[in-house]
Image (cartoon, grey):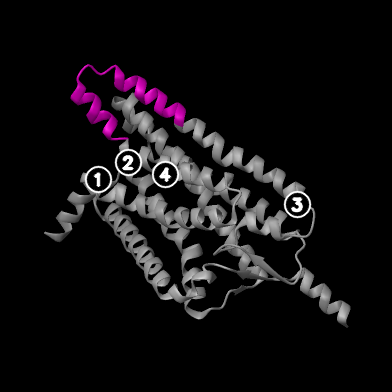
Amino acid sequence: MGGEEDTNVTLWPRFYLFAFSTFENQSIIIVTVVLLIYLIVLSGNLLIISLISIEPRLHTPMYFFLCNLSALDIMYVSTTLPKLMYICLTGDHIVSYASCMAQMYWYHVFADTECFLLTSMAIDRYVAVCFPLHYSLIMSKQVCVLLVFPAWFMSSISASIITYLTYNLTFFGLVDIRNFFCDLKALVMASISDTTSLKTYIIVGAIFVGVVPSCLILASYARIIHTVLKIKSSVGRWKTFSSCSSHITIVIVYFGSAMCLYLSNSVEEDVILSMMFDTLVPTLNLLVYSLRNKDIIMAIQKIIH
């Protein structure tokens, strides 16, 4: 009987998310800050999605991608932040095996999709700058869908493989996860079985999801810069390149944060970088594409008036 119980514990472990347990006295402050960020991201992106849906002037390829990015950010922060607030409020750090696997799966789906979506937006900027006269013809609705759908599909496949390989790992008893969500790196460290196949796929996945999109984005902007430098007027050069400034900002922040998180070897750094990655990037996506976007501001003013 005892052996059967031990087997069940091994096959269906539970996970203890440390979150910010060392700052339990400041749990109210943490919840307040996280809740504020969550509400800003949630309400702001819902506003952008609504504006793009009802304003005919925003029915363009660029705003189609932005609408997808806003929906993605809402789902992305909803994967980790509500659970973090629940842990801080209740002190219940225990997560079931199924919940942990589900959270990890969706986290990777949304994180990977953003990589591919930012690449699609770079291609959109490339066509807009390098082929302005043929932009509407090249970036048709069908092409936009073909750029977005594979992003979600490939991310789902990649996340499924990661989840399957993690599911086959062996854990024992109450597993300590040194993060505020079911982080893949923490799960690999906590496993007592051979993780060679999973670590191999993580490297392959990093190349597929991170390196390849980065190269495509760099190639797009190399062509954009080459085209911009041909413009004789300095005002024209600045006006043309400024149309890409929001996207460049998000790309630098997103891929820079992801690279730091991937290369980090410290548990403390992982928690801080994960928190920044989960809050700073979605917030910047909102601020950069709304407060600095004249079309969005005009759409808001039109509704208000």
Cα separation between marks 3 and 4:
30 Å
User: Is the stretch drawn in magenta largely helix, strand or loop?
Assistant: helix
Instruction: List x then y, in percent, for residue 172.
Output: 76, 68
Q: Which residue is mark 3?
A: 195
Label located before the other in sequence (1 or 3): 3
Above or below, 285 against 93 in this view is: above
C-beta proximity under 8 Å, tags 2 and 1:
yes
Cα separation between marks 2 and 4:
11 Å
Q: Which residue is mark 4?
A: 253
Label located before the other in sequence (3 or 2): 3
Mark 1 residue crowding within 10 angstroms, few (<14) / some (14–19) / many (20+): few
Mark 4 residue crowding within 10 angstroms, few (<14) / some (14–19) / many (20+): some
Query: Which residue is at the front of the view, 97 or 29?
Result: 29
Disc number for residue 270: none
Disc number for residue 293: 1
Magenta-colored span: 218-244
Marks 1, 3: nearer the viewer: 3
In magenta segment, residue 236: yes
> In the image, what residue type sits under mark 4?
Val
Marks 3, 2: nearer the viewer: 3
Where disc 3 sits, the SS reads loop
Q: Quadrant of residue 181?
A: bottom right
Above or below, 123 against 10 in this view is: above
The structure residue drawn at horizontal position 71% and vertical position 43%, both measured from the top left corner, is: 200
Cα separation between marks 2 and 1:
9 Å
Q: Which residue is mark 2?
A: 246
Name the quarter where the C terminus is drawn. bottom left
